[in-house]
Image (cartoon, grey):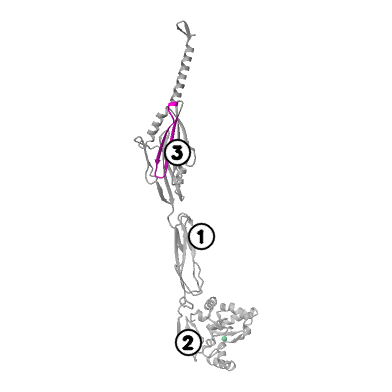
């Protein structure tokens, strides 16, 4: 064992070392205790106002043994909830804890006296020590569908440019909404500056509304309006035809000019509207009718090439065409086809000359008087039978009205080129009561057109 001679006593070197270590320990502990007693709790408060948020921080420094415990309490305020949320996320990521509403807390220790730590802290937090600003606007508005190029930030620490910026973002240019880009610049191990840029993706483009059909529609009195259709699409919402609101006050039985309004809005409330004009003509207006082409030749009236005989247009005395071979042939065919179905369409009366009609009418006048006779028989010159194109078939009597024969004629005569010349409820137009037995030959094309139109020959030709 190694020993040192100290006078008479011999002290072992090991024991001496232990003694020295213990002494130093006691001195250090005492010094720390004295230091703690003489250095009271320090605090430092600072506020920073950024463009779209504010931060106020209270920092306290407290010595414990040879270290300084730093407690930061941060209170954040912003008019934008979305920024407060981003700020919270950033602080939680950096090890802060929530300490109340929009308030955060963090404790860390730095070796050394709190006085030194605080002075260092103040130096680093001095606004002149670092610079951190957004390029461009802090509140951007981007039209949906356009690209956004981040203009980034400027950062300087202790006079030197720093590119060491961390970026966090939830930006989605394909969706309308508000987004935040957060930029963090680490000034030192314990201090990070943060900036936030608000980005609003908006849709200010109006939908497209297209009307099908004409922009002005003219209708006859009572003619039903039928919507020609429309379609709507939006750059953001897509197909929105179902959202189109139609304001239609058209009254088909009230003549006038109407405006139908179509309008549609997209999700961003961009509204667009379109109009259609509807004109309802006056009652009995002939606007839509074609002016009939009336030709008179040798006292015979032709309308659009069709010979017409009625109480208004009569035939001359000397007109004597005899029976039309074409009409008679068609009649035979019709009679035969009807007969095959058990229907008797025997000819009662065919061609009459002027003289025959004169005698017939005089006979009726003698029997019923002129006024009544005129409703079922024609004055000479005014009978269609004089054209050779008209026939009375079946039975010339009101008892023929609802017979299967009368119904078959009504449904099929046009197929053979005939029309029922004096239809039901048209006495005000034709001047004659319903005569289901009286057929007039026009050829199948015209007869079918007249039959389909449900009009009298006079109406079909535009005479009434
Ligand atoms: Zn007749």
- Where does label 1 land, which residue? 242
- Where does label 2 land, which residue? 300
> Between marks 2 and 1, how big is the CA–CA gap?
59 Å
Residue 52 colored magenta?
yes
Q: Does residue 270 appear anywhere in the picture? A: yes
N-terminal of the pair, mark 2 or mark 1, is: 1
Front residue of 205 and 443: 205
| Residue at 42% in and 47% down | 199
Q: Which residues are magenta?
A: 37-62
Q: Does residue 351 appear anywhere in the picture? A: no
Q: Quarter of the picture for ligand 1?
A: bottom right
The percent position of residue 439, horizontal first and vertical second, equals: 56, 83
- Tell which tag, 2 or 1, sits nearer the viewer: 1
Q: Which mark is residue 74?
A: 3
The percent position of residue 209, horizontal first and vertical second, equals: 45, 61
Determine the residue located farthest toward the right in the rendered image: 342
Q: Give the secondary structure at mark 3.
A: strand
Q: Give the secondary structure at mark 1.
A: helix
Crowding near the residue tagged with mark 2, few <14, some 14–19, many ≥20 C-alpha atoms within 10 Å: some
Crowding near the residue tagged with mark 3, few <14, some 14–19, many ≥20 C-alpha atoms within 10 Å: many
């Amino acid at each position: 064992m190694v020993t040192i001679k100290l006078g008479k006593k011999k002290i072992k070197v090991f024991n001496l070392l232990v003694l020295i270590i213990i002494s130093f320990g006691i001195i250090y502990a005492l010094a720390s205790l004295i230091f703690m007693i003489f250095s009271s709790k320090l605090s430092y408060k600072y506020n920073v106002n950024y463009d779209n948020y504010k931060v106020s921080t209270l920092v306290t420094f407290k010595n414990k043994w040879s270290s300084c415990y730093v407690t930061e309490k941060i209170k954040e305020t912003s008019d934008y909830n979305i920024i407060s949320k981003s700020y919270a996320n950033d602080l939680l990521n950096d090890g802060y804890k929530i300490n109340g509403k929009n308030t955060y807390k963090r404790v860390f220790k730095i070796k050394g006296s709190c006085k030194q730590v605080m002075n260092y802290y103040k130096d680093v937090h001095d606004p002149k020590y670092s610079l951190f600003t957004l390029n461009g606007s802090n509140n951007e508005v981007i039209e949906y569908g356009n690209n956004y190029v981040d203009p980034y930030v400027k950062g300087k620490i202790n006079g030197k440019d720093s590119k060491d910026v961390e970026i966090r973002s939830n930006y989605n240019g394909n969706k309308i909404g508000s987004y935040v880009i957060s930029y963090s610049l680490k000034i030192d191990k314990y201090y990070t500056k943060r900036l936030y840029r608000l980005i609003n993706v908006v849709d200010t483009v109006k939908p497209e509304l297209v009307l099908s059909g004409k922009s002005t529609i003219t209708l006859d009195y009572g003619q039903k309006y039928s919507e020609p259709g429309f379609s709507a699409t939006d750059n953001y919402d897509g197909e929105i035809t179902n959202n189109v609101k139609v304001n239609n006050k058209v009254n088909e039985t009230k003549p006038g000019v109407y405006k139908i309004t179509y309008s549609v809005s997209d999700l961003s409330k961009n509204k667009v509207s379109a109009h259609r004009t509807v004109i309802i003509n006056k009652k009995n207006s002939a606007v839509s009718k074609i002016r009939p082409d009336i030709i008179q030749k040798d006292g015979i009236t032709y309308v659009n090439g069709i010979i017409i005989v009625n109480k208004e247009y009569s035939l001359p005395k000397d007109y004597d065409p005899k029976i039309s071979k074409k009409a008679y042939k068609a009649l035979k065919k019709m009679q035969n086809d009807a007969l095959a179905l058990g229907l008797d369409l025997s000819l009662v009366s065919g061609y009459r000359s002027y003289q025959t009609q004169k005698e017939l009418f005089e006979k009726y006048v003698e029997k019923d008087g002129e006024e009544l006779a005129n409703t079922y028989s024609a004055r000479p010159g005014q009978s269609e039978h004089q054209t050779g194109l008209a026939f009375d078939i079946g039975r010339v009597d009101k008892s023929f009205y609802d017979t299967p024969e009368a119904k078959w004629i009504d449904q099929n005569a046009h197929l053979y080129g005939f029309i029922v010349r004096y239809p039901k409820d048209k006495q005000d137009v034709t001047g004659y009561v319903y005569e289901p037995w009286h057929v007039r030959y026009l050829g199948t094309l015209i007869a079918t057109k007249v039959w389909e139109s449900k009009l009298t020959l006079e109406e079909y030709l535009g005479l009434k």
